Image: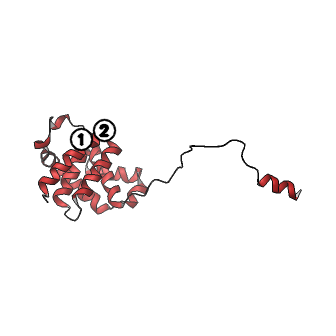
């Protein structure tokens, strides 16, 4: 019996499994990244539903509690408040670099551009490449399929204007 058990434990599988992708845990996102991501959602809700900032934040807290708890609430509040109050002003900063009308850019991409403009103008401790990368990552997450290329180009041009080397 002991030998039978030993033989069973050392059996090799009859089917060889190849090319099976290893599932890795997705990387943990920083509190700042989560704040930007939540800001996109809150601003979208405000623009689409004409809700107040408070109502949109409350809805988000209830539906994304675990994410909200890891986010940087101070950054989230600043981004949302400034972006909502100055949406058109921030968006118009991209006008010299556009080959189409602002109104032809979808709302999600407009929101991401506004957040990036806000950060370029007000978050001096955050390097421009980080802001550009965050805009690209948010666009990959929420935007149209290849729109991250469009966003990358616009935010990069605005970064060079606002923060020349």
Nearer to the camera, 60 or 30: 30
Q: Are marks 2 and 1 in contact (CB under 8 Å)?
A: yes
In the rendered image, the residue lying farthest to the bottom is 125
Q: Count neighbours of disc 2 (C-alpha within 10 A) and say few if under 14, some if 14 to 19, many if 20 or more.
A: few
In the rendered image, the residue lying farthest to the right is 1
In the displayed structure image, the side of residue 160 where residue 152 appears, left or right: right
Choose top left, top right, bottom left or bottom right for residue 148: top left
Q: Point out which mark residue 150 bears.
A: 1
Q: Residue at x 80, y 52 (%)?
A: 8
Residue 49 in view here? no
Nearer to the camera, 108 or 12: 12
Q: What is the secondary structure assignment of the residue under circle 2? A: loop
Residue 14 in view here? yes
Q: Residue at x 17, y 60 (%)?
A: 122
Q: Residue at x 76, y 50 (%)?
A: 11
In the rendered image, the residue lying farthest to the left is 96
Q: Quadrant of the N terminus?
A: bottom right
> Residue 124, how many percent across, how many down?
19, 63
Q: Count neighbours of disc 1 (C-alpha within 10 A) and say few if under 14, some if 14 to 19, many if 20 or more.
A: few
> Residue 165, how many percent across, how many down?
14, 60
Q: CA distance from mark 2 to mark 1?
A: 8 Å
> Residue 29, how many percent across, how many down?
39, 57
Q: Point out which mark residue 146 bears.
A: 2
In the displayed structure image, the side of residue 90 where residue 53 appears, left or right: right
Q: Residue at x 33, y 43 (%)?
A: 142
Q: What is the secondary structure assignment of the residue under circle 1? A: helix
């Amino acid at each position: 019996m002991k030998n039978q058990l030993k033989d069973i434990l050392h059996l090799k599988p009859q089917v060889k499994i190849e090319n099976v992708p290893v599932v890795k845990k997705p990387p943990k996102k920083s509190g700042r990244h989560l704040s930007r991501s939540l800001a996109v959602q809150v601003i979208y809700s405000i623009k689409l539903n004409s809700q107040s900032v408070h109502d949109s934040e409350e809805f988000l807290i209830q539906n994304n509690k675990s994410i909200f708890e890891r986010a940087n609430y101070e950054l989230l509040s600043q981004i949302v408040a400034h972006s909502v109050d100055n949406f058109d002003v921030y968006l118009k900063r991209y006008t010299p670099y556009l080959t189409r009308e602002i109104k032809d850019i979808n709302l999600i991409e407009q929101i991401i551009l506004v957040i990036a403009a806000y950060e370029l103008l007000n978050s001096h401790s955050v390097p421009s490449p980080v802001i550009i990368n965050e805009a690209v990552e948010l666009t990959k997450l929420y935007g149209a399929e290849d729109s991250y290329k469009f966003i990358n180009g616009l935010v990069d041009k605005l970064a060079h204007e606002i923060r020349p080397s």
